Image (cartoon, helix red, strand yellow):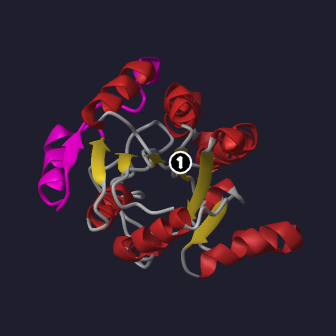
Amino acid sequence: MQFNGKVVWITGASSGIGEGLAYALAKKNCNLILSARNITELERVRQNCNAETKILPFDLADFDNANENVSKAIGLFGKIDVLILNGGVSQRSLIIETDFSVDKKLIEIDYLANVALAKAILPHFIQHKYGHFAVVTSLMGKFGSPYRSGYCGAKHALHGFFDVMRMEHQKDGVNVTMVCPGFIQTNVAKNALTADGSKQVVDDEATQNGLPVTVFAQRMIKAIENNKFETYIGRKEVLGVYLKRFFPKLLHNFVLKTKVR
């Protein structure tokens, strides 16, 4: 798959991974649509993109308006070729301390909002006999870690849904790439929800020492170009995927002995 001339829609594009993807894809002669809640930050990213770029601000959690938002997005360039589902929120709280409203919010933002957009744009992809979903999940969608129960649940759910999306609509020219980041140098930890739903605010050492966003963006783009079903991007933490598959008890004991927060 070549990005040249494609219309690419990125959610969560006002910072972090989404912002990095916007800059990297702008160099590949794409037409970009950037979405997030923060209009000011979206405009800042747009101005820094050396490509035809438009913004479509909306709240990902407002998934009842997914059909309307998809129609608006299609109207900006007349079509969508690639939808990068990147928007979401993380978590840092123990199960016993976490209010159920936080679990609900994580499912709504990290799972249902992405499903809603995917289902809304699917008829467009089928009509044009081409479309590519690139879904930014997490290594936490493949194995678990303390303090991230609701987040892990939502990310695991994404894999179940989009694996079936690929199976059911490959015949219609619809492709799906699941992208699983490890620790990436973003504000994900600062913005993570705590037990009462407030933001953690402070960063953590693992995130600070993670991959630079520029490196992650290039690896993700390559995975999409190669039409990979699934890719794991990070440092040594990606080994957890293979430990989970072949030595689940070893992973369990290793995580328990590791300082996680």
The spot of residue 206 in percent (x, y) is 48, 74
Q: What amino acid is at disc 1? A: His
Q: Is residue 202 visible?
A: no
In the foreground, 75 or 87: 75
Q: Is residue 149 visible?
A: yes
Question: In the drawing, does residue 136 fall left or right of residue 246?
Answer: left
The spot of residue 19 in percent (x, y) is 29, 58
In the foreground, 162 or 58: 162
Question: In the drawing, does residue 250 fall left or right of residue 121?
Answer: right
Q: Residue at x 58, y 34 (%)?
A: 103
Magenta-drawn segment: 36-65
**In the rendered image, which quarter is residue 190 located in?**
bottom left
| In the image, residue 58 lies in the stretch drawn in magenta | yes
| In the image, residue 12 lies in the stretch drawn in magenta | no
The residue where tag 1 is placed is 132
Outermost residue to the bottom: 236
Q: Residue at x 44, y 37 (%)?
A: 197
